[in-house]
Image (cartoon, rainbow, N blue to C red):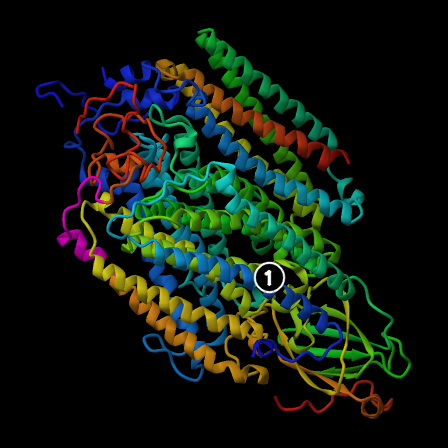
Amino acid sequence: MDRELDAAGSGIFEPGETIGMPIGKVGVWWFLASEIMVFGGLIGTFILFRIAHGGWADEAAHVNWRLGATNTFVLLTSSCTMIMALSAARTGRRERTAHFLLATVLLGLTFLGIKGIEYTREISEGFTPASGMFWSFYFLLTGLHGIHVIAGIIINATLYVAAIRGTLWSGHHEERLEFAGLYWHFVDVVWIFLFPLLYLS
Amino acid sequence: MTPGRPRLRRTNPTPTATETGIQMNIAIAPHHQAETSFIRRYIFSTDHKVIGKQYMLLSLTMAIIGGFTAYLIRWQLAWPETDIPGWGAIGPDNYNAIITMHGTVMVFFVAMPFLLGAFGNYLIPLMIGARDMAFPRLNMMSFWTIFVAAAVLTVSMFVPGGPAAAGWTAYTPLSDNPIYTGVTWGQNLWLLALALEFASFLMGGINFLTTTLNMRAPGMTLWRLPLFVWLEVTAAVVFLLSVGPLVAGALMLLADRTLGTGFFRPDRGGDPLLWEHLFWFFGHPEVYVVALPGFGIMLEVLPVFARKPIFGYRTMVWSTVAAGALSFVVWAHHMFVSGMDPRLATPFSVTTILISVPFAILVFCMIATVWGGSISFTTPMLFALGGLASFIVGGVTGIFLGSATTDIFLHGTYFVVAHFHYTLFPVTFFGGFAGLYYWYPKMFGRMMNETLGKIHFWLTFVFFNAVFIPLFAVGLRGNPRRIYEMSSYNFLAPVQHLHVIATIATIGLLVGQFAVVVNFAWSMARGKKAAANPWHAATLEWATDSPPPHENFEHVPVVYRDAYEYSVPGEANDWIAQTEPAIGHLSHVAAD
Amino acid sequence: MLTGLLPANASTFGGDIDHVFWLIFWIVGFWFVLAEGVLAYSLVRYRKGSSKRAAYLRGDSVRQLAWVLVPAAIILCLDLGIDRAGASAWDRIKGGIPPAATTVRITAKQFNWNFTYPGPDGKFGTADDVTVENDLHVPAGKVVRFELRSEDVIHSFFVPEFRLKQDVVPGRTIAGWFQADKPGTYEIACSELCGFGHYSMHGNVVVQSAKDYEAWSHDSWTPKTASNKSNADSD
């Protein structure tokens, strides 16, 4: 036993010197903070442009708000399944965890599928990133978001595979799920901003 | 160390994320590194000390490119009708590419990796009494990411169309549409290199913050942290919060260049000024990201060689935080005459001039730190003092630029160039060299040669001033910047001789750097072996061997003192280590 | 000798800018000399001697900190004073355009300056508009309004001797003004990197007496040709 523990016990080390939050969590929040600034920059710019250029109502009329709303529902549900997965893991119910992870992955893929349908339709109608400012923002915002969804799906799928193989349970599984969950919720929250800005206004 | 006691054998132990740092610190017992391969130990190492040295090597290598571009620029300006020795003739398009590479390399691949990557990584765990950073593998990835970024930028210099040529500021639409510069791949690769560099520092920054928050040794309260640590962490946080909008802007610029969007192109409905806002929203905090660590180094060196505590430690912490926060609301002082709404000029002039107050406090506290001291003019001290003296010039000249009215005349002239070199060069090179000479014994276990060090200092200090004072003068005459040669303008003929002086001084400055190159190499092999604490300094990095063992400390130190207890009245020694127990506590049994 | 630092001023608002410049110069000059002086003094006075120990000054009492905070407070007040002076000058120069006798449209492009006059009918966009390259002729002692446009990238219209600078941004028209005191030729430089020809984007403001300007415009705006190029003076 190292002597430092004795020293720590003797009161030299003031309690509360560490902030008490596991370093992994600080790490995830740091990463999310940087992502918030990126999306924030893009979204803020979009809002300012849109106001300055008279609203883009004509262009915006061509996005399919029903598909967008469906996707919102899909993502929100996937956040729920993610929470259920974490809760199942905390209570030691391994199969349930795996099932909910799978559900999250499938919902994520559904989101991408619907997005793909939208893109296909829009491009076939002649709307590409080069079709004007609204479409430039639309494709960049949803495209960047989509890349983040893909990354999240990969993370969740990896956890799912680990769950069914049994390797997830060897240690710190709660943490890994919690961090993956934080990231996935972030992806969801970004969409919550994008949906009204792109589809509803 | 008790002989015969069995030791835990683990190779490159990976800290687990569940444990708070202090438990992690204690859980990893020192172990032998005998079984790790060369590659694991020196190339793909997770040891923060190795990573710090890798960053140092990268930044000093890139500094050769940065310095060489300075040579090309200055020769061209002094003697435009001649070929540049060692290079040949350059045309105006090459010139624009060279100035772009100079700025990009110096800010992103010299200043940041040298001040943050090298010194931050090497010193933070040591100074707080930790065995490594919180995320060693992430740390390793951060280095290799910037390595790839530097490689991408270097490759961009050789692609068809040449490297980016729109300045390090890459204003649109000049950087947006290839027809304006003829640069195609070069600008795209520039964007990629920057994106990778940003990713690298985001990865590195998380380590600075978490490690400092969670892995301090027992007794290391936040108010006992060396100021260097405060400044590095503040810089990392400022970087984190400011870089996002530029990443957004870079994505938009890349989309404009490759996907046909028109975010910054008026012919497609976009706005060139949007780029300026996004760039400078990051760009201004960025210069403080560079300046704060440079100050941090000076603040470690000044008290040691004045044998005096830091004057106003807490005041300086608050000033640093204030400066960091204010840095987010000054950006449009780069855009006073840009065509943005003129009503924004006065508010931004006010915020900009206000930021001079925390910096004035920092400068005054530094001067107060040496006042009344017992000053030894060692090489690190000379560089720290020279950096402070030079930075004051940069600081006061900033006032002219921060006031929108005078900026009407001075914007886009050499006055700006001289101003920012009088801020960036002191923090990067005077501060950086102060750090190098100060911590070289700790890093490499050898002392550097003092005589060569002093020669290096004087050559650097004299020639640096000799380059940039003339440039203030030509700027005041209205000499625009980023100009390939002055012959188009009659009003510049009378100041051409000042350009010649600046160029001769540049050559002297660059030649003078050989002193440190030689010193660095020679001392590595032949320098006097360094003791654990050759400078009799109080902070924790000096409480272990030079160089430190793989796990930094034989036993995690316990901290009882503030970081700068020098010349304490009534004490026999003129310094007290942070690990020296105060009266009434158990003394730790000396282990080393 | 100090006044030789800046080029001679030839415009009405140049003096306002120079006034703020010199105000800042003396204020920061004082603090510069003081700070460097105290620093230099410390280095000489407090060199490591044989016996004198350093003073243990932590700067954590108000009394000690006053040495730093009081100067900082003074600087804050001076800063705000500088901003006051600067703000009123800025408003005069950039805050609006006084009634102008002459309006010129300035077009910046890679890599020269074109100046378009409304011609005898006084209206832009009509057949008698006159475009002149490189040389901007204006009458002395009269307010000149200009409208800046770019055909390609961002440029910057800079006349050092008028202390006049305004970036030219494609996609927008930016208006400004100046009034030149006396006849003469004053150089125009581009002060925003605009491509490989940025260094050669030179022009002239040719300020003429009322009589000479009258003669020039009569000469150059003759209706028989839609646009005339003046013989550009050699650089």
Residue appearing at x 72%, y 47% in the figure: A49
Instruction: Return the residue nearer the eye: B338 or B407.
Output: B407
Q: Is residue B532 magenta?
A: yes
The image quarter containing residue C138 is bottom right
Q: Foreground: B57 or B177?
A: B57
* Residue B464 appears left or right of B244: left
**Type of residue at label 1?**
Ile
Q: Which residue is mark 1?
A: C27
Residue B486 vs residue A62: left or right?
left
Quadrant where the C terminus of chain C sits is bottom right
Residue C226 appears in the picture as rendered:
yes
- Which residues fall within the magenta stretch? B516-534
Does C119 sit left or right of B108 as displayed?
right
Name which residue lies at 32% across and 22% down. Answer: B24
Task: Pinpoint residue B398: horizontal percent, then vertical percent.
Answer: 56, 59
For the point 62% across and 79% down, which residue is it? Answer: C7
- For residue C54, side relative to residue C148 (left or right): left
Viewer-side residue, A151 vs B31 = B31
The picture places residue A23, in percent across and down from the top left corner, at 42, 25
